[in-house]
Image: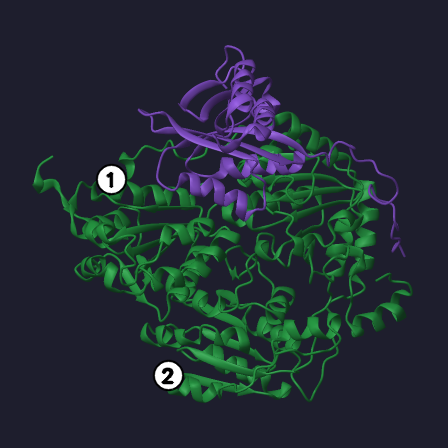
Chain colours: A green, B purple
Amino acid sequence: MTQANKITGAEIVIKALIDQGVDTVFGYPGGAILPIYDELFQQKKIKHILVRHEQAATHAAEGYARSTGKIGVVFVTSGPGATNSVTGLTDALMDSVPIVVISGQVPTFMIGNDAFQEADTVGITRPCTKHNWLVKDTNKLAETIHKAFEVAGSGRPGPVLVDVPKDVQFASGRYTKKNEIKRDFIKKEPPIDLNMLDEAINRLELAERPIIYSGGGVINSGQSAVNSLRNLVAGTNFPITSTLMGLGSYPASGKNWLGMLGMHGTYEANMSMHDCDFMLCIGARFDDRITGRIDAFSPNSYKVHIDIDPSSINKNITVEAPLIGDVSRILSTLIARWKERGSKVNKKKLSAWWKSINDWKGVKSLGYENSSNVIKPQYAVQRLEELTKSYSRFVSTEVGQHQMWAAQFMGFEEPNRWMTSGGLGTMGYGFPASIGIQIAHPNSLVINVAGEASWLMNMQELGTAVQYRLPVKQFILNNERLGMVRQWQELLHGERYSHSWSDALPDFVKLAEAYGIKGIRCEDPARLDDGIREMIECPGPVIFDCLVEKHENCFPMIPSGKAHNEMILGEQTEKNSISDDGAVLV
Amino acid sequence: MSLKLKKGVNKQSAYNLRDPNLDYEAAHTLSIIVDNESGVLARVIGLFSGRGYNIDSLTVAEVDPNGHRSRITIVTTGTPKVVNQIKAQLNRMVPVHEVIDLTLKGKAVQRELAIFKVVGNGNQRVESLRLADVFRAKVVDSTLKSFTFELTGTSEKIDAFAELMAPLGLKEIARTGIVALLRGDNSN
């Protein structure tokens, strides 16, 4: 190897990213990553989006990744830059989002000396990444970056971090191409357990009360998995429900759709889960927001669980038929074998099951009492849905009541259109995520459905939105409360509203104007549609301050520690259900 | 109207259909082959502490210098469900190549090495030497009033020896923790 074949570590980083097909990086410069930023400055293939806080860079990369299926990339500096990325890394780990964070580090000879802006980045991020690396040798830098992309994107996707000390960025070393690395570190998928699969198909054919419960794994597995899922639903006529992460894999307008399940899922979805005798769980992980009380979860069903991650099997719920592997591969095999055997289902029992489900649907669990004086948050989301659904639309959310209302009232026809923080529940996720989504889809309508409290957590990103002329629409359901906290305090903590109101809120319209963008305030239900239309038609970013009913609760709700059939329904629904149906057990 | 809820009819509440051994906690010896890279032990230990698993014993050393592989031997206690979860979580880690549950795989040789410092005079000193002989402990260091014994064996044997030495002037113990391999001619 001659000196001439060597390039600097900083050049290697940029070259490796280009080799990986990266065109966008979200980041924030600082001392320990300056050589890489210097290289970034001298090239044109990678666009850099300067955020206003490193946490936002990670969420923007998540939004970018989830809306495209590609890997999101982040640059941060050492110390505080790296520690600020921890929330985004954890969020991505919980929701299986592939992102690669490249962090600057103090020079190798300073590590351990409590140098300026030094932090034990690999130590801090070890439990919140799929894997991480500290690169001490420039010759290994390219290989490590390529490995990082492989790890992030393969199997169950997730975040990784590569920590690059400043002297490694300056030093010269060999460049290794993407296809030159050994791939022995990739976990091999086991072959499909065909005996188990056939047993699952036996049960599927005989099922009297089946349900398909799908999750984010279907979306991560890609379009062919989504197509297989839709084919399976169409072929079997089984009802389907999805987790918060899985919305869009089956179209919300589809006739077998029961809506989301879980803590704030629909009555029909949760009752079907509880009463079913055959459950096909596809790419979901029996999270506690889904199951409610574990020992009362779907007590009489035969459970099939398709998951690429063996550690998801039998973690929360013991299943009869685990099938480990990529959803797309397993589902297509399952469908092929089921068709070979004559595409049988228990039609007679199935129609009786649908009758029960339709009775549950009749409860209209998403009902609420509308008002002509004050905007009900559910109404605001419904109108937003109605006026935007014809657009090429992407939706992100923050975390809380508004998130659940968005999940309940917005319909997603396609995957990768709905970006929300599910596992970690990160307030402040939605605004930066909407920025990442808009970067990836410049001509689409990108809306962040927010609550005012969550939105304030990353409001500094207004600067990013304005700098890059990103027409992201911030639809804030402003109840001047931490709505979900307030709801729990009302229902579970004796109405003691400890620190759950948003005092000293900014004037959101003036805040928008301070950044030179449009602000719209609306508090009259009659003017809501006009306001939303004005927001959509505005070519730039908009803050929509939607003043809503302050004490609205989000129903239905399974209180934690309760079973699916112990849901609390809203007052409006209970009135309906008692008059309409007589004896709904709640 | 078919809004019938089957109240109380489930596997848990009607009567217990679950395998009574399911919640039985047992010790498992896991042999974990990992890349010998910096931080790998921290990853493995971090998994155990982060997810609330037990570590009863832990040893680690490089066993294949050419392949840069180390063997970590961990003794952990848990129900079958928890132990399965531990193995699945370990297998997920990038530097982990293999996780072998020696307790399930068959009979394994399990050994520990310990060093004891026993200080005393007269009969106590003679008795400690005599017992050391019974246990086939080796004297690896000695002064006029002390012996340092080296003992290899199962953890039970080392516990027993420690108990006997306690009244005879036992001052300090160092133990390696368990190392283990499957019996027989199969590797793993």
**Secondary structure beneath disc 2?**
loop
Q: Is residue B35 visible?
A: yes
Asked if one can make out residue A436 in the rendered structure from this viewpoint, the answer is no
- Measuring from the top left, give residue A557's x and y in whole percent: 73, 64
- At horizontal 66% and vertical 53% (from top left) the residue drawn is A288
Q: SS class of the residue under badge 1? A: loop
Circle 2 crowding by C-alpha within 10 Å: few under 14, some 14–19, many from 20: some
Depth check: B40 or A34 in front? B40
Nearer-the-camera pick, A274 or B128: B128
Q: Which residue is mark 1?
A: A177
Give coordinates of residue A279: x percent, y percent: 71, 43
Cα distance between the residues tagged 2 and 1: 44 Å
Q: Which residue is mark 2?
A: A515
Q: Chain of mark 2?
A: A
Q: Amino acid at mark 1?
A: Lys
- Residue positioned 69% across, 38% down in the render: A319
Relative placement, left or right, of A498 versus A495 is left
Q: Amino acid at mark 2?
A: Tyr
